[in-house]
Image (cartoon, rainbow, N blue to C red):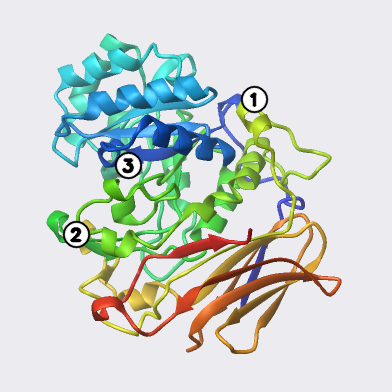
């Protein structure tokens, strides 16, 4: 058993002193517009409200040049965000999905939306980002002059050293480096390298819960370690205090790091087999605790100390009720074929490993309790594991499969009474088409 606590009400002051104004702190979720062609205004409204409930400020709208429906979908997105209110959007131009964007189209698209009420302004300028595009860095001085944008690209392939050569072009940087390489947990070394290289310019920090993709049409078939990442990465965010955080992602189903609802019509071809029946919505449950702690650079909200920065946050206050959030894979890693999936991405120069070396066969569970309690985790009909949960913090644990199979039961017990419970689907050695399921199932108590 691994037992840890995010002791948000007892955290010491971080040793990393923020370089940024406190009013900068914003949290966005990366939204793939290419997966939203069939979304209705009602679905957009529902997704935006769900994001607001999680205390997310808005969406970073990833758009690709080959999609002929982009302008239509952007119009619906901005219209809906403005109708709902208190929700912001900014454009992220994807230069890898369908090749580079022509500079004139970038200018036209930015200028078409920059004055909309829902457009996010960062330090008095409309924020614009990218997904890569390092072959077109020379386009951006003219684009910036023609649009007046605040330009914070994701040019991760340059690395912190390479970014030094374009500091005169960019206003900040966003890194896609949200996952650890190999059989280890993620540390903050890469974040600190980016922050140092930017020399005071704003750093947009990435956070993600999971990564697995198997899409041969795009030559993608690998995983990176998720496991405890969602919980511990937020602790790192509280320490580093970046001015903007970007969640990867709201709806990137093909790479399984979605935290939004599954709209099956938007799932890429070939991905439905590992996305269907794998909800990730419960990863949003404790986001209000994590995000508000980040914004205040202090412990998690207690009843006497919660402060909300905008009206939308006040509309959806933090819950202090007993709550369980859990996630795990439904197949042990040795129960079938890896289906060619590698641990790490060799195409990026990373050493290929067996995914079994990286993805741990464990049940991961976080719990909030208002008073000290016991948390029971039981796999199948085997004896339960009993964990001690501290009061008024997000407690986090993991319990090994240890060869056990069956449904997974969770319960918070206090004063010999059950305060919250949940039952997750069974862990089984029976794999669909004999291929191990590398995606996570995420659930919660009622």
Point out residue 350 in the picture as x, y percentages from the top left corner. Answer: 26, 63
- Provide the residue designation for mark 2: 347
Foreground residue among 247 and 314 = 314
Disc marking residue 311: 1
Which label's residue is closer to the chain start, 2 or 1?
A: 1
Would residue 102 be found to the left or right of residue 24 on screen?
left
Q: Helix, strand, or loop for circle 3?
A: helix
Helix or strand or loop: what does disc 2 sit on? helix
x, y percentage for residue 263? Answer: 35, 47
Residue 170 visible, this orientation: no
Give the Cα separation between the discs numbered 1 and 3: 40 Å
Q: Is residue 310 left or right of residue 264?
A: right
Seen in the picture, residue 325 relative to 251 is either above or below; the reply is below
Residue corresponding to mark 3: 161
Q: Quadrant of residue 313?
A: top right
* Disc with the residue nearer the chain's start (2 vs 3): 3
């Amino acid at each position: 058993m691994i037992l840890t606590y995010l002791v948000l009400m007892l955290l010491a002051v971080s040793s990393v002193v923020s370089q940024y104004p406190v009013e900068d702190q914003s949290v966005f979720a990366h939204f793939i517009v290419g997966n939203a062609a069939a979304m209705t205004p009602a679905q957009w409204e529902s997704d935006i409200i769900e994001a607001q409930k999680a205390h997310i400020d808005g969406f970073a709208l990833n758009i690709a040049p080959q999609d002929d429906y982009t302008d239509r979908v952007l119009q619906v997105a901005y219209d809906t965000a403005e109708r709902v209110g208190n929700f912001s959007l900014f454009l992220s131009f994807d230069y890898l999905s369908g090749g580079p964007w022509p500079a004139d189209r970038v200018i036209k698209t930015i200028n078409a939306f920059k004055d909309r009420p829902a457009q996010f302004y960062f330090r008095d300028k409309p924020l614009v980002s990218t997904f890569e595009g390092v072959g077109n860095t020379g386009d951006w001085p003219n684009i910036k002059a023609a649009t007046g944008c605040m330009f914070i690209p994701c040019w991760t392939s340059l690395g912190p050293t390479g970014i030094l050569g374009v500091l005169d072009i960019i206003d900040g940087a966003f890194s896609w480096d949200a996952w650890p390489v190999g059989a280890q947990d993620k540390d903050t070394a890469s974040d600190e390298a980016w922050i140092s290289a930017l020399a005071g310019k704003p750093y947009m920090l990435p956070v993600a819960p999971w990564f697995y993709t198997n899409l041969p049409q795009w030559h993608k078939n690998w995983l990176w370690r998720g496991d405890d990442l969602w919980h511990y990465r937020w602790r790192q965010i509280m320490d580093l205090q970046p001015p903007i955080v970007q969640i990867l992602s709201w709806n990137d189903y093909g790479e399984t790091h979605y935290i939004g609802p599954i709209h099956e019509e938007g799932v890429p071809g070939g991905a439905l087999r590992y996305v269907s029946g794998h909800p990730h919505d419960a990863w949003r449950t404790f986001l209000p605790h994590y995000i508000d702690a980040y914004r205040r650079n202090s412990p998690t909200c207690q009843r006497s100390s919660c402060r909300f920065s905008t009206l939308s946050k006040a509309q959806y206050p933090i819950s202090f009720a007993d709550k369980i959030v859990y996630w795990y894979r439904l197949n042990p890693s040795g129960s079938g074929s890896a289906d060619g999936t590698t641990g790490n991405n060799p195409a990026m120069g990373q050493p290929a490993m067996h995914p079994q070396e990286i993805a741990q066969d464990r049940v991961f569970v976080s719990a909030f309790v208002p008073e000290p309690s016991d948390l029971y985790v039981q796999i199948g009909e085997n004896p339960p594991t009993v964990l001690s949960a501290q009061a008024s913090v997000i407690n986090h644990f993991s319990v090994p499969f240890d060869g056990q199979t069956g449904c997974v039961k969770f319960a918070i017990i206090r004063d010999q009474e059950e305060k919250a419970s949940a039952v997750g689907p069974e862990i089984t050695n029976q794999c669909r088409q004999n291929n191990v399921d590398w995606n996570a199932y995420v659930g919660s108590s009622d």
